[in-house]
Amino acid sequence: MGDVTTIQSITNNYKQQVLFINTEGGQDNMFVGPGQSAASKAQVPWCDHLEDFPHHFLMVSAAGNVYFIWQSGPYVWGSPEGWGQETAEQISEGGSVNLIISADFKISLTN
């Protein structure tokens, strides 16, 4: 395991409102309007096994688009398809990060 990754803020550059969900705790769930940012203290859930995935991820969704985020080992992974290293991309090495949704619904985490 690596360090806990915390989402400090969510910036929505997409044309629609986005829904941010933390499956480990409803207190982090929120809507973020287009062109808006919101403060967050959500920790990226640890998920090292497929059977754990249904209850250990963050999800960003809007207008039929969806993106899943989870931590495994020292890295944060993301995928529009859910669990699986085949479909996932490494999007961060952890720490405190900002989640950015681009105008074409691409998700990135920046320090």
Image: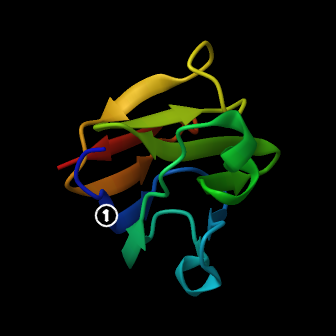
Instruction: Indicate left or right for 29 with 81 as reference.
Output: left
Instruction: Indicate left or right for 102 with 32 as reference.
Output: left
Residue at 56% over, 50% down = 14
Residue type highlighted by circle 1: Thr
Name the residue beneath numbered marker 1. Answer: 6
Q: Relative to 55, does residue 26 appear above or below in the rendering?
A: below
Q: Nearer the viewer, residue 105 or 42?
A: 42
Q: Position of residue 36 (x, y in %)?
A: 44, 70
Q: Is residue 38 visible?
A: no
Residue at 55% over, 23% down = 88
Q: Position of residue 61 (x, y in %)?
A: 69, 53
Instruction: Indicate left or right for 13 with 109 as reference.
Output: right
Q: Position of residue 70 (x, y in %)?
A: 51, 46
Q: Nearer the viewer, residue 86 or 12?
A: 86
Give the image's coloring scheme.
Answer: rainbow
Q: Quadrant of residue 26 in the image?
A: bottom right
Q: Relative to 12, does residue 78 appear above or below in the rendering?
A: above
Q: Secondary structure at mark 1?
A: strand
The quarter in which the N terminus is drawn is: top left
